[in-house]
Image (cartoon, grey):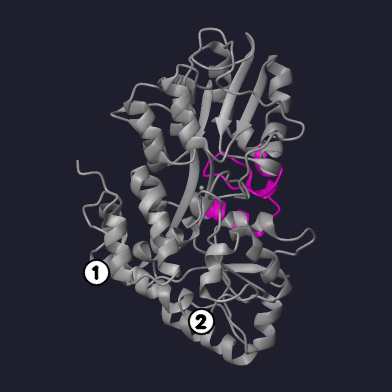
Amino acid sequence: MGLSQRSRRYAPIALLGVAGIALAGCGAPGGSTGGGGGGGGDNTVTIYGTIVEGEAELLAESWSDFEKENDITIKYEGSQDFETQLGTRAQGGNPPDIAIFPQPGLFADYAARDFLKPAPDAVEANAKKYWTQGWVDFGTYKDEFYGAPLMASVKGWVWYSPKKFAEWGVQEPTSWDELLTLTKTIQEKSGTAPWCAGFESGVATGWPGTDWIEDLVLRNAGADVYDQWVKNEVPFTDPQIKEAFDATGELLLNPDYVNAGFGDVRSINSTAFGDVAPKVASGECALTHQASFLSGFFPDGTDISEDGDVWAFLLPSKSEDETFITGGGEIVGAFSDDEATQKVLEYLSSPEWADKRLALGGVTSANKGVDIEAVENPILQESIKLLQDDSVTFRFDGSDQMPGAVGSGTFWKGMVAWINGTSTDEVLTQIETGWPSS
C-alpha cells in the first residue's frame, strides 16, 4: 500500500474529508447515467480509493483541467477502511463508479464476482502501449481486461545521509555481507543503533515488515521461488522463506542495531513508518528500508541527492550481476460503463494524466509514455527507469498478491508478533494458517 498510499504502502492513513475536494459517499442516492455507482449527476463520476490527506489533494489537482475541458465532475473519497467499505457498497448495489485498487488480488476478486465492467477498448490500448505485459496482466482476469495501472512504487531502497557516510568513512554496499559490515562499522563509530524502522500504519500495521521479507525472498531465493511463494506452492514454513526472516532478523531483531531515535526493537511496531524520514535527514538514524515514496516524508527543503542530505541505494542481492526489485501500485477498475466514466478511465490510463501527477511530485509511474525529465526527485527518476527497464527482474508486492486473509491478515499480524518476540518458526506457522483451504 506512499508518497502516494494511500492506505498502507504510501502515505499516512486517516478517515477524513480532504480540504478542497468534493467527497461523495459512494452509497449516496443518485448515480451517473447508466452506471452502477453512487454519482451525483449525469456528468459526475465517483472514485473511491485508499489515497488520503495531502495525496488526495494532489490527485484532485491532477485531473482538474480534464474536468473543466470535458464538463465532468469527479468526486473522490479516500478511506483507510477501503476493503471493507467497498465490499459493503458493492454487495448493497451502491458501488462507486470507479475504484482504485491497491492490491491486484483484491482487484481480481471483484472481477471474478462480476462486480467490475470490462475496460473500454481505449483503456486496454493505452495499457498495452505504455506498460509492460506484467502490468497489463495485473488488470486481466480470465483473458478479459478489466483495468489499467495508475501509479507505482519501487521498494527495497535503503535511505541514508551522505554527509554521515562521509563522516564515518563508509560507502554504499554491493552485497548483503557488505551491508552487515557497514551496519557494524556505523554502530561502532557512532556508538548508536544504525537502523530505524516503523511498522505502525493504523489498521495496516505490519506491512513495512512484509516488504523486508518480500525483498529478501526475491533477492536470495529468486523469481521462481517468489512466484511459487505468492501462490502458496512454496509455503511460509519452507526453509527458503525462513532464510528471508533470519536475514531480516540479523538487523531488525538486534537491539544493538535498532531502533535509532525511537527506542528498542519492540518500538518498531509503535513507530509510524513515515516518522523515520526526518530522523534519517537529521542524521540521527543512519539507515532505513523503505520504498521510493518515502521521499515525500522528508522535511521541506531536504536535499535528496548523492551529495545532499539524503540519498538511497537498493537493498543488495546475492548476485551483483542482476537487479531485483519489488514494487507496488494501483489498478483502476470500474463498476459503471457510462460515457463519463469511460472518459475518466481513458484519461487515467494515459501518459498525459501520469505527467500531470508526476509533475506534482512524490510518486512514480511505470507508464512508458511519461516525461521522466519532468520529475525533479532523482530517486523517483531512477525508480521510473527501473520500472521501465526490461533487464530488471520486477515482482509485484507479494502480500498484495496473496489472498486478503494472508497478505493483509496473518502476514501483517505475523510481522508484528515477530518483532514482539514470537519465534520465527511459530510466526511462520501462524502466517501459513491464513491460506484458504481451497
Label drawn at residue 137: none
Q: Is residue 280 visible?
A: yes
Q: Nearer the viewer, mark 2 or mark 1?
A: 2
Residues drawn in magenta: 357-385
Q: Residues within 10 Å of mark 2 (few under 14, many from 20)?
A: some
- Residue 115 lies left or right of residue 387; in this view the side is left
Quadrant in which residue 19 is drawn: top right
Label drawn at residue 239: 1
- Residue 435 lies left or right of residue 392; in this view the side is left
Quadrant in which residue 318 is drawn: bottom left
Q: Is residue 323 visible?
A: no
Front residue (pair 137, 400): 400
The reply to whether the magenta stretch includes residue 368 is yes
* Amino acid type, residue under disc 1 in the picture: Pro
- In the image, residue 367 sits, relative to residue 271, either above or below, namely above
- In the image, residue 232 sits, relative to residue 92, either above or below, namely below
Q: How many marks?
A: 2
Q: Position of residue 93 (x, y in %)?
A: 45, 16
Q: Position of residue 36 (x, y in %)?
A: 49, 14
Front residue (pair 355, 40): 40
Q: Position of residue 156 (x, y in %)?
A: 49, 62
Residue behind mark 2: 255
The reply to whether the magenta stretch includes residue 130 is no
- In the image, residue 86 sits, relative to residue 432, either above or below, namely above
Residue at image position (71%, 60%) is 298
Q: Residues within 10 Å of mark 1 (few under 14, many from 20)?
A: few
* Amino acid type, residue under disc 2 in the picture: Pro
User: Is label 1 in a helix, a strand or a loop?
Assistant: helix
Q: Position of residue 267 (x, y in %)?
A: 56, 70
Earlier sequence position, callout 2 versus callout 1: 1
User: Is label 2 in a helix, a strand or a loop?
Assistant: loop
- Residue 314 lies left or right of residue 303; in this view the side is left
